[in-house]
């Protein structure tokens, strides 16, 4: 897990080459920051830190920089971004990269340089010599989506760093309210810990009271009330969103997006796909797939298809002015929450 990778960085026993791979942006950015902080003092960055975008600069230029002695310091950090030449992507490269030059460097990297290859991809094309060479010679840090259990462990780790205790049901509730967003969990734990103070205990009720809800999370809660046939609570969420000046068309769009996801999860599950496969296919966080699967159990596939048609009609009604926008939303939710025969 990435936390173990970070622990190794914190020892400041740095390797000359790091490969960061994965599509979890927050983990990727934090890993880069930690590597830079471990290698350089703040006042050294102006002289000894370079960033190269591989879509704009040839890799051999970056390697020449990596081979240059640091100026008034012990280390130099060179960051390579967007190295699509390591993948199997079929696109016309604007830049010709001398990958053989890169391979030679990997065999004998400069001991005074920390070379970071930031690859925001699910995987590299290991048929390529340069990809094989990089994986063989680099320390690899993964920035991949965490499982539900890893997300819960993550919240406990964050709380411990703030010298607070996070109760188990509070951790699960926080993961749910933030839809598995690592950045949001970090921010919320920091806020909750500041509220309780060192040695405090973060409870589920405190999480519920203090955690900020995103618009998407409110839409998820609204749909949960609908599936539970609780029209009054669904309407309450809707009116709270309207009081917060959220546009009815935007609310309807997000409701449509969530029901589209529910339908896709329903169809793929029926086709024998497991939740990890569905998450990979739809390029959606696994935790969101789990929640959508729970909501999908309340509807048949045919009902969801009819719902998508009604949502399209509601969208048309809003955009043509056939009926007052808020009334369209209210009627849709009331009808949707009615017990079905």
Image: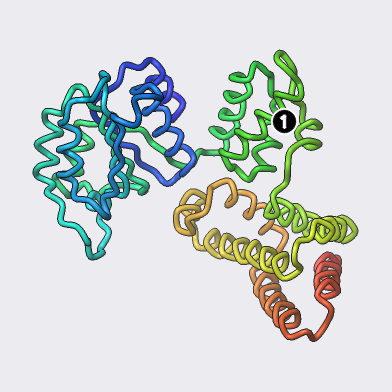
Q: Residue 80, located in which quarter of the rendered image?
A: top left
Q: Nearer the viewer, residue 295 or 177?
A: 177
- Please name the residue that numbered disc 1 is placed on: 170
Q: Which of 111 and 173 is in front in this view?
A: 111
284 left or right of 317 in image = left
290 left or right of 110 in image = right
Image quadrant holding the N terminus, namely top left
Residue 60: image location, x then y, percent: 15, 44
Q: Is residue 171 above or below residue 271?
A: above
What kind of colouring is applied to the model shown? rainbow
Residue visible at 66% across and 30% down in the picture: 189
How many tags in the picture?
Answer: 1
Residue 73: image location, x then y, percent: 27, 19
Residue 169: image location, x then y, percent: 72, 30
Residue visible at 75% across and 52% down in the picture: 221
Q: Is residue 98 above or below residue 154?
A: below
Q: Is residue 136 above or below residue 233?
A: above
Dot 1, how many residues are within 10 Å of its Cα: few (below 14), some (14-19), or many (20+)? many
Q: Nearer the viewer, residue 153 or 81?
A: 81
Residue visible at 19% across and 57% down in the picture: 95
Image quadrant holding the C terminus, namely bottom right
113 left or right of 290 in image = left
For label 1, the SS is helix
Residue visible at 57% across and 28% down in the picture: 153
Q: Residue 93, located in which quarter of the rendered image?
A: bottom left
Residue 224: image location, x then y, percent: 76, 54
169 left or right of 80 in image = right
Q: Which of 115 and 127 is in front in this view?
A: 115
């Amino acid at each position: 897990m990435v936390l173990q990778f970070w622990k190794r960085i914190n020892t400041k026993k740095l390797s000359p080459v790091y490969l960061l791979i994965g599509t979890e942006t927050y983990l990727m950015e934090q890993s880069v920051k930690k590597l830079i902080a471990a290698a350089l003092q703040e006042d050294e960055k102006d002289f000894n830190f370079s960033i190269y975008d591989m879509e704009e600069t040839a890799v051999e230029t970056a390697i020449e920089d990596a081979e240059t002695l640091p100026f008034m310091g012990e280390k130099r950090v060179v960051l390579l971004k967007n190295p699509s030449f390591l993948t199997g992507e079929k696109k016309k490269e604007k830049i010709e990269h001398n990958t053989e030059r890169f391979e030679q460097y990997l065999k004998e990297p400069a001991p005074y340089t920390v070379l970071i290859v930031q690859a925001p991809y699910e995987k590299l094309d290991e048929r390529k010599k340069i990809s094989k060479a990089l994986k063989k010679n680099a320390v690899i840090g993964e920035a991949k989506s965490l499982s539900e259990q890893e997300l819960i462990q993550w919240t406990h780790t964050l709380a411990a760093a703030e010298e607070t205790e996070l109760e188990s049901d509070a951790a699960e509730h926080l993961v749910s309210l933030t839809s598995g967003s690592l950045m949001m969990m970090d921010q919320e734990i920091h806020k909750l810990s500041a509220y309780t103070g060192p040695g405090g205990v973060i409870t589920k009720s405190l999480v519920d009271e203090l955690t900020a809800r995103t618009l998407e999370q409110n839409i998820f809660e609204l749909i949960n009330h609908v599936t539970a046939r609780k029209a009054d609570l669904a309407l309450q969420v809707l009116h709270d969103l309207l009081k917060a000046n959220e546009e009815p068309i935007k609310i309807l769009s997000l409701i449509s997006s969530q029901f589209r996801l529910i339908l896709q999860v329903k169809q793929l599950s029926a086709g024998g796909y497991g939740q990890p496969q569905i998450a990979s296919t739809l390029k959606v966080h696994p935790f969101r797939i789990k929640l959508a699967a729970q909501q999908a159990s309340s509807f048949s596939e045919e009902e969801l298809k009819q719902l998508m048609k009604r949502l399209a009609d509601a969208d048309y009604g809003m955009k043509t002015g056939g009926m007052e926008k808020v009334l369209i939303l209210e009627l849709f939710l009331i009808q949707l929450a009615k017990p079905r025969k």
